[in-house]
Image: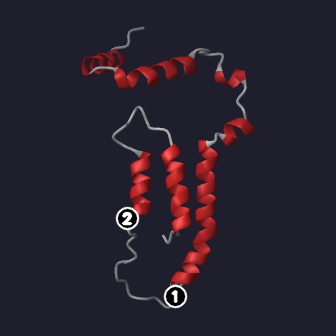
Amino acid sequence: MATSVRTTKHYLRALSRWPADILRPELSFQATMRARFLLPSSTTTTASPPSSSSPPPPTTAAAAKDSKPDELSQINALYSLLENRYSRKYPLSDAFLRPAFNPTYYDDLLAEINVAPTRSWVGRMLNRWKGFLRFS
């Protein structure tokens, strides 16, 4: 992917604002995306015999011209996720957030997500066994 310096700066600025994942800190979205933009991209492909039905690959200038609007739309999508544009544009109703079958479901889920990273190994194992052994 041919990225210009300006688009790389946009990506890196957006990634610096991206929140850290508290449930999986070892799988960092920011580190993965930074590696994608800071390492030189490999443009070599495996050798395959050219077929007469496929068109020739585009030149680098044509590929860069075609990928620029795509990269800008990806940057725009990244910023829109960071700024919560969609949650403001399409807010969820209270009836959706508090389903009739279990009104505290999402509150309980958020509480569990906040507690999970600080839980000890023994606590994780106890919760796992509690999930296996459900009595009705």
Q: Nearer the viewer, mark 1 or mark 2?
A: 2
Cα–Cα span, label 1 and label 2: 27 Å
| SS for dot 2 | loop
- Give the residue furthest to the left: 122
Task: Point out residue 100 in the picture as x, y percentages from the top left corner.
Answer: 66, 16
| Picture coordinates of residue 121, whole percent (x, y) | 26, 22
Q: Residue at x 38, y 69 (%)?
A: 40
- On the rendered structure, is 130 left or right of 82? left
* Residue 9: x %, y % from top left: 52, 59
Count residues near mark 2 (Cα–Cα under 10 Å), then give few for <14, some for 14-19, many for 20+.
few
N-terminal label among 1 and 2: 2
Whether residue 123 is situated above or below residue 57 in the rendered picture: above
Quadrant placement of the C terminus: top left
Check the image and name the residue furthest to the top.
136
Residue under pointer 2 = 39
Q: Which mark is residue 81?
A: none
Label 1 sits on residue: 56
- Taking depth in this image into account, of 107 and 131 the one nearest to the observer is 107
What amino acid is at disc 1? Pro
Way the structure is coloured: secondary structure
Give the secondary structure at mark 1. loop
Place of residue 130 in the rendered image (x, y in percent of width and height, measured from the top left): 34, 15
